[in-house]
Amino acid sequence: MTVLDARALNRATLARQMLLDRSDAPVLDAVAHLCGLQAQEPQEPFVGLWSRLRGFDPAVLSDLLVERHVVRTHLMRRTVHLVTADDALAWRARHGSMLRQRVLGVYRSELAEVDLEELADAGRAVVADGEPRSMPELARALADRWPEPGTRALGEVLVAALIPMVQLPPRGLWRQKGAARNLPVASWLGREVDPLPENGSDPVGEALVRRYLAAFGPATSADLRAWCGLAGLPGAVPAIREELISFRDERGRELLDLPDAPRPDPDTPAPVRFLPAFDNAILGYQDRSRIIDDDHRGLSVAGERVVLVDGRVAATWNVVDGTVNVTPLHRFSRTDRTEVAEQGRELAAFLSDGENTRVRIAASPR
């Protein structure tokens, strides 16, 4: 079986994540291809798409949110994701059990005496009036009946697990701030969440495997499970095994993939890319060594924005007073500094509507 080393996996990831070459895909198609973008920090998806799409206009993404073609909702790993409306409806029921288990993992003691089905029915009755509510507002509406858990636990379990909900604009719009106010998915989209099949089949799981591999492969079953948080999803692999091909990584683990998916030459040049906090390209794997050194793995869960140099995490970045500040994690060559500065100026211009192109690169560590 062919062995793919870390560099080969890196280039495959970059190609499928639209980071090797910027894509001309429409914004909606890009969100769908990427299986959504993690979005608990509302402005981060705009940077993620700017790094991936040629000529990206942030107003287009805002319009897609307002026009209900994309939504912000709890899905993979119980985190808020920006996904297409179609994917939210197709995937939500398949994620329901995981969402409930993860909320209970945090609030098990607070919710121990609560009948969750009864709570869900009561919550649905409250939100049936079509009035958007924050988590605390929804919880307070039910606190007289369930005073013991507290509003945080009640709000979390209702909005993130028991009732399929979406966060409404203006939250998530370009350069706009807004509290997270929620409505049921069905109310906002005018369509009910797709139910799970009653015959025990798993067509959604099989489709998720294909979609994941198209955007993240080649990958192990552990990577697939880490991306979505669904413990049972690798069980969908046998049903489509004949569609897939296999490789090995350098540790001997099986890597699954789609036959016709891109696997570029490992020597393909990789341009500098600025990634937002919690970017797909890093968080989409259990083993992230294809793109980030183990010594820096903590950056990916701490919400640090990172810079890719030669396809790997090589620096962090932030913006202060309009200036893009880059902090290298290891020594930059002169060429590295030039390319990072050039891309940083483009990012500064994007974030400021062309008003400035200021970038500052700190000294490389010794």
Image: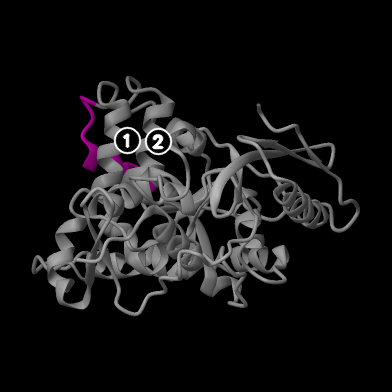
Q: In which quarter of the image is the N terminus?
A: bottom left
74 and 277: which is toward the camera: 277
Residue located beneath label 1 in the image: 103
Query: Which tag, 1 or 2, sits closer to the chain's start?
Result: 1
Q: Residue 83: percent from the left, percent from the top? A: 48, 61
Residue 201: x percent and y percent? Answer: 12, 68
State the separation of the CA atoms marked 1 and 2. Answer: 7 Å
- Left or right, 266 with respect to 218, comes to right
Residue at image point 46% right, 67% down: 16
The magenta region covers 112-125
Label placed on residue 228: none
What x and y, as percent, mark residue 191?
40, 70
User: Badge 1, how many Cα within 10 Å: few under 14, some, many 20+?
Assistant: some
Foreground of the two, 215 or 148: 215
The dot on residue 156 is: 2
Residue at 56% over, 63% down: 19
**Element marked by disc 2:** helix
* Most frequent secondary structure within the magenta stretch: helix
Tell me the quarter of the image containing the C terminus: top right
Q: Is residue 77 magenta?
A: no
- Residue type for callout 2: Glu
Query: Is residue 40 found left or right of 44 in the rendered image?
Result: left
For the residue pair 147 and 247, the one nearer the viewer reads as 247
Colour setting:
one colour
Q: Which residue is drawn at 25% across and 67% down?
A: 204
Residue 124 showing in the rendered view: no
- Check the image and report above or below for 334 versus 249: above
Snapshot quadrant of residue 5: bottom left
**Residue positioned most to the bottom:** 260
119 is within the stretch colored magenta:
yes
